[in-house]
Image (cartoon, coloured by chain):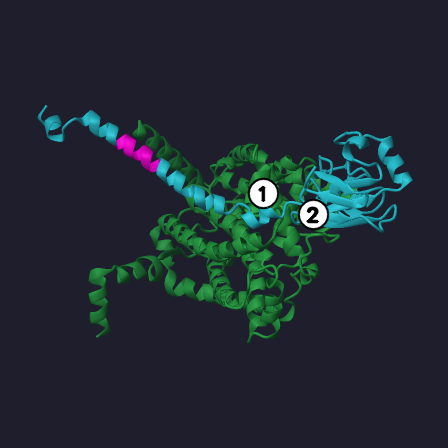
Chain colours: A green, B cyan
Amino acid sequence: MSNKIMQWVDRRFPLTSFVKHDLSEYPTPRNLSYWWNFGSLAGIVLVLQVLTGIFLAMHYKADVAQSFNSIQHIMRDVNYGWLLRYMHSTGASAFFLVIFIHMARTLYYGSYRAPRELLWWTGQGLLLLLMGTAFMGYLLPWGQMSFWGATVITNLFRATPFIGDQVVVWLRGDYTVGDETLTRFFALHYLLPFVIIGAVMVHLIALHMVKSSNPSGIDLADKDNIPFHPYFTIKDLYGLGVFLMVYFGFALFFPNLLIEPANNIPANPMQTPNHIVPEWYFLPFYAILRSVPNMVGGVVAMGLSVMLFAFMPFLDRSKIPGGALYRPIYRLQFYLFIIDMMILGYIGYVPPTDQTIVIGQIASVVYFGIFFILPFTSKIEEKWLRNRGLPAQVEALIASEELQIAQKKSGGK
Amino acid sequence: MAHDEALGDVGRRDFLFKVTTVVGGVGVAAATVPFVTSMNPSADLLAKATTEVDLAGMDPGHMRTVAWQGKPVFVLRRTEEQIKLAVASKGVLDPVDDQQRVKQAEWLVVIGVCTHMGCVPNLEGEGWTCHCHGSQYDYSGRVVRGPAGKNLEVPPYHFSAADKLVIGEA
């Protein structure tokens, strides 16, 4: 009977072939490590955020007079409201943690390189959408940090040439962050996750076109790919179990660790808290903003610091396949970048003093420097490694790739 | 040729195609205007243009923060010493005479929004300090330390009586 129903469906909609092609029999490199778990984890966190968010929206009120109290109502009176809210606020941090690891893996193993540039760029778009959604969501509790965070960030748009002031007023719908701002941020905070779901579909279509990268950096022969189900469904599920332990550890035992205490004070437009900090996931970028003495320069530097990742396929000019695993100089740059990010994060967190400003400026220069020297270091490193002698198979691979590129170029003419 | 005859005047078709594209494009652009404009401040917000402040009972050195168009405005009754400090310098990063920033030397009226990122500075030290990014302003509201590059803005205001201040109207 069910067989007949499936046949009936398959004549009208490619269900069975889709499931086989893209899920159960989807060819996946057999050598993927646990670093490849974070893509599917990000998808699961997205589902968690949408789910908890929709149920929170049933109790939340987007109005300056009511929003702060509606959060207290959710926390105290709504059945399991505390759980929904703590899952949602912890979920935001979890989302960024998972995405940052996902990006770090891509950078370490060079997964952004051809032919996966579009996959990387759709990911970059997803990062921007995630940042926008998180930023708008942070205004909704209408605490002091919510208000002043939104004030500072909307103020960044004053850097727009010629019409900066008008753009800021237009974004806020008022001369200051107010009721209009809160209502529109709520509307957009509800909308953007669905835009993200759409963008994730595009990301996955791009992935299934070029298939997953793997730690070796070499596209595997068919015999080295194994079906996604059951091998990777089970591996992803195991990773999910570990993730959920950490996630609920935070959500249930330390839910306030990542919520700034000042956000438990209702927003006061007449008084800025003595020490305002963004959420931890924005700290490195915020430190770069603060390091530039000029406002427009700071905004441009911060924007660039987020967008530079998109240029990686162009900046990395090495022909040696794979990422940091086989490239000592690149590996050094990678770890330097991670350490630099941590320093920037710390500088973004502490109140500005003359000393921290200097450290922040040095760390910012290092941040951009790592990107800007990559075209040269990657070439030098390639020369050095090839002179030292690569395995014959790797040289053959490089030669065949060069031949392909040459053929494409002459074929185009 | 027979082909062209079947299609009629090809040049005319091309022209019509281009005109339709342009008119359609203009129509779409025009249709975005109400949506984009709806996000600007509404009429009731624009109507709250002025704020009246009662200055009675403010001693020298006393500051009040009042809301004007939702923004904090600092009204400081400066002491002799503060006036002396303010007149003595021209500011650092955005130099201007103190006389040009006040109507009566005793009263300083400035918008209490840091010109860097929009935080509200606190009255401390020799003027105001913004805790968000460390900008400092003197007793004339002029910036003496970055990252802010401009002085605190002076709103349009006038004294309607000896102890009545109207902000929003020069």
- Residue A251 picture location, percent across and down: 60, 68
Q: Is residue A78 above or below residue A186?
A: below
Q: Which disc, if any, is residue A82?
A: none
Name the residue that disc number 2 marks: B51
Q: Is residue A355 above or below residue A225?
A: above
- Neighbor class of circle 1 (other Cα within 10 Å; few <14, some 14-19, many 20+) is many
Q: What element carries label 2?
A: strand
Image check: A26 left or right of B111? left
Q: In this view, does B161 lie above or below A5?
A: above
Indicate yes or no whether the magenta region holds residue A108: no
Tell me where the magenta segment starts and ends, as one range. B17-25
Q: Which residue lies furthest to the front in this view?
A: B161
Q: Which disc, if any, is residue A168?
A: 1
Give the amino acid type for the residue marked by disc 1 in the picture: Val
Indicate yes or no whether the magenta region holds residue B21: yes
Q: Which residue lies furthest to the right in this view?
A: B81
